[in-house]
Each structure stands twice: as C-alpha cells, then as structure tokens.
Image: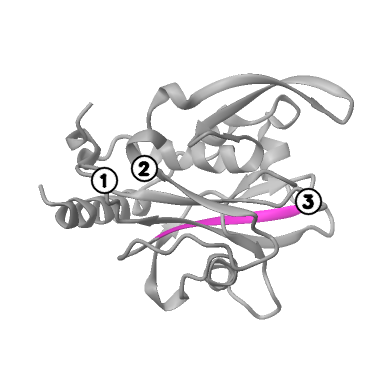
C-alpha cells in the first residue's frame, strides 16, 4: 500500500475508533505514578483548578510502511511546572474559548502548525494533574502534511516525533526509580526516541496506545 493511502486508512480507522467507547482511566492508570494510581486522584477536580486542553497530533510518516507519526514536545528545564518533561502541545483555556479551540490555538503557538490545517478527530478521557492543578482535556487530530518540527514558543525546548509502530511496541514500556519530593518511587515510563516519558503525558499516551493498538491498519506494519 502506498504511503499516502496508508496514512488515509490510518486516519479513517482512528476516526471510527474515537467515536466508540474509549479505554478510559483504566488504560491511563497503567502508566500512573504510584502516588496517583487511583480513580479519585485522576478524575477529581480540586477547588480552583484550571481547565486546559492538549492535542495528540498525527501526521504522515516519510518512512516506508509506517502509517503515521505522533508529535511531542520537550519543556525547557527552567519552567516552574513539569520542567524538562515530554509533553503535548497545549495549555490553559482562555475565557469564552472552547476546549478544542484551546488545543488548536496552543498547538499553533507552540509548534507553528496553522490550526486551520488540523482536523480534530475526537477527545480522549480528561485527566486531573495535581502538580500544576490543571484538569486536562486531550484531543486527537491530524494534519495532512509532515510539519517542519521547530519550536516557536519559550515553553518548548525541542520537538520530536514517534512513528506509530514504535508507539505501540510493548518494549518501550519500563519501570525506573525516581525521587519525587524527597521520596523514592518506582515509576512506569515510556522510552520514546531516547526520551523518558512519564507522568501525565505517559498516562494520556497509555489511553491513546490502548485505543489504536487494535486498529486493523497497524497489522500491515512489517514486524
């Protein structure tokens, strides 16, 4: 199957998959740090929390037989929240702005992909993030052309992409010992393109991976 046809088939199947029941918090909690491994902690808004939205953006891969790639960012080390961590484009919802619009606006601001070129396919399950006090609404979308991966915001240190075949590979999952607030924990993580992905981003990715892993188009990727 030609690359373009493969990508379009991936998009069609993804659209259908997102219109059906989502894996939900069960999938997210598989990648939750131990101190957040509960339904209440992941799904309960704290008083005064802020609404936010992020975008999991797919685009055509230039690798033969690879259906698509997913865009991710890395935050600068000097940020007050989630410094140096892998993230999705996204941010706080502005007044009178829809959550979907927030995801598109933030993506354009952070990685210079024009929002009108993005098609949103559907949402994933919202997630409360205690360290930053955000209730995050993830959306999934695509752009029809491979973007120029360059950061255009001081909230992004660099950008990278992950082929879908790598994303769904079980070997990218691991456990690591990390010190958080003076306590040592065993933390689940995803190893993606040499990056250590954990916390909220890994939890959102876990639901996305669970959702797409059964899509027939992915059976066409050579092992």
- Which residue is disc 1 drawn over? 63
Task: Give the vertical position of 144 relative to 59 (above or below).
Answer: below
Per the rendered image, the range of residues in magenta is 132-141
Query: How far is disc 2 from disc 3 in space, using C-alphas?
Result: 29 Å
- Rendering quarter of residue 141: bottom left
- Which residue is disc 3 drawn over? 132
Residue nearest the observer in this picture, 46 or 207: 207
Describe residue 8's horizontal placement relative to residue 88 as left or right: left
Query: How far is disc 3 from disc 1 in space, using C-alphas?
Result: 37 Å
- Is 134 colored magenta in this rendering? yes
Disc 2, disc 1: CB below 8 Å? Answer: yes
For disc 1, the neighbor class at 10 Å (few under 14, some 14 to 19, many from 20) is: few
In this view, which residue lies farthest toward the bottom? Answer: 96
- Which residue is disc 2 drawn over? 163
Can you say which quadrant of the picture contains the C terminus? top left
Mark closest to the chain's N terminus, 2 or 1: 1
Q: Nearer the viewer, mark 2 or mark 3?
A: 2
Query: Residue 183's x, y, as percent?
Result: 86, 22
Q: Which mark is residue 172?
A: none
Mark closest to the chain's N terminus, 3 or 1: 1
């Amino acid at each position: 199957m030609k690359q373009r046809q493969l990508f379009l088939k991936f998009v069609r199947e993804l659209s259908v998959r997102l219109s059906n029941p989502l894996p939900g918090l069960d999938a997210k909690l598989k990648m939750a740090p131990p101190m957040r491994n509960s339904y209440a902690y992941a799904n309960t808004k704290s008083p005064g929390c802020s609404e936010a939205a992020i975008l999991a953006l797919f685009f055509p891969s230039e690798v033969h037989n690879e259906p698509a790639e997913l865009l991710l960012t890395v935050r600068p080390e000097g940020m007050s929240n989630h410094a140096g961590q892998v993230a999705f484009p996204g941010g706080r919802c502005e007044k009178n702005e829809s959550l979907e619009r927030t995801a598109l606006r933030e993506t354009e601001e952070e990685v210079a992909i024009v929002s009108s070129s993005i098609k949103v396919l559907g949402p994933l399950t919202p997630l409360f993030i205690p360290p930053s006090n955000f209730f995050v609404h993830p959306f999934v979308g695509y752009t029809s052309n491979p973007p120029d991966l360059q950061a255009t915001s001081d909230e992004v240190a660099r950008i990278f992409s992950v082929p879908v075949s790598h994303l769904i590979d079980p070997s990218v999952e691991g456990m690591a010992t990390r010190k958080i607030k003076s306590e040592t924990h065993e933390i689940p993580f995803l190893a993606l393109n040499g990056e250590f992905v954990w916390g909220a981003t890994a939890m959102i990715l876990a639901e996305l991976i669970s959702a797409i892993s059964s899509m027939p188009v992915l059976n066409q990727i050579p092992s």
